[in-house]
Amino acid sequence: MLVPNILNRSQVMQKSTRREYWQIAEKFLADYQIIDMRDLDKINNAFCHLAVNASPNYWYRKRRALVVRLEANGMNDIANQINLIQYPINKLEMPYEYFEAHCHRRQQRKKVSHQEHIMLIEYCLRKKDMVLQSALLMAWLLGCCRPIELTTLKILSNNRIKIKGAKKTKDGQRGLDRVLHVDEHVPPLVEKWLELFENERNKKDCAPDRAMRRIQRRLENATKVLWPERENQITLYTYRHQLGSDIKGSDMSRVDGAAMMGHQSVNSLDAYGNVRYASRVPNIGVSKISSSAVRNRTLKSINPKVLKMKSEIA
């Protein structure tokens, strides 16, 4: 691809530098699916996502590259506004969805073995991090929870746990709350987790999402210590994928599986796990009322050509 001449403040740059900036900007736009370079909201959101795990130098280099790219197209007004976007000094102040989306998309491992879970628990014991240990235990016992849903668990009678759906919309079109049936030893552990989490919040007098974010960062540090060579690490969301695999490997119906995961469509279960990674039979159940809230019970049809390709690959 030919790189156009870059004018304005970038005119004094070496050709190699201009070309490098152009390529960086093109990749940034492609990674975040930005088609309209005048869409400031989408660009700002992209930089928020980028900041979650990027150093200031790396972040500002991306911003600089995009500014150069915009100026090359004569879009100086947009370039000037992009230059006003600043790297967040305190990442804990960022909205939770940026942090969650980053973990979900970029760092996440899709399976976690019992041995890996034990290694994480032992790490917590060595570090005396009871909060992270308890969070991991909740993820292992209640794998269907999204990380933020762990903060609003409610203990009901008769060994039942209510999960408030984080993706539930006001119009009721997406997501759902659900009630799980658990073993009798689980409610006391949930109660202990909620107590520890409240203490975690009180340390910094912060909102639940910020406290959960701190816990997730400590888990990220733990995985880097335990498995430094891995590109994709275990996150709390990994346990959700693992349960998806276990559901697919069991005789649980897709309706019950969707309800357990907090979805209104049986097709949403396809996004989680792989039957090849199934390692145990789920030891939790979902209430009939929760399952009855699953509205879409029809599986999408599969294109025969796609099915043939999958069989050939397998």
Image: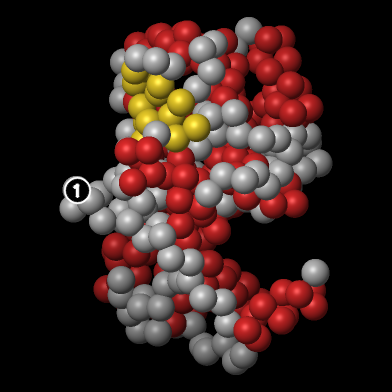
Q: Quadrant of residue 251?
A: top right
Residue 159: x and y, percent? 43, 16
In this rendered view, identify the residue nearer to me: 3 or 26: 26
Q: Residue at x 38, y 31 (%)?
A: 179
Residue farthest to the left, as pictured: 171
- Going by the numbered disc 1, the residue's amino acid type is Lys
Q: Quadrant of residue 78?
A: bottom left
In this rendered view, identify the residue nearer to me: 193 or 81: 193
Question: Is 101 located above or below residue 303 in the figure?
Answer: above
Residue 289: x and y, percent? 32, 38
Q: Is residue 63 visible?
A: no
Q: Residues within 10 Å of mark 1 (few under 14, many from 20)?
A: few
Q: Is residue 68 left or right of residue 168?
A: right
**Count of numbered circles on the image:** 1
Question: Is 82 located above or below residue 96 in the figure?
Answer: below
Q: Is residue 4 left or right of residue 93?
A: right
Q: Is residue 4 visible?
A: yes
Say which residue label 1 marks.
170
Q: Quadrant of residue 281?
A: top right
Element assignment for label 1: loop
Residue 140: x and y, percent? 60, 27
Q: Is residue 2 left or right of residue 35?
A: right
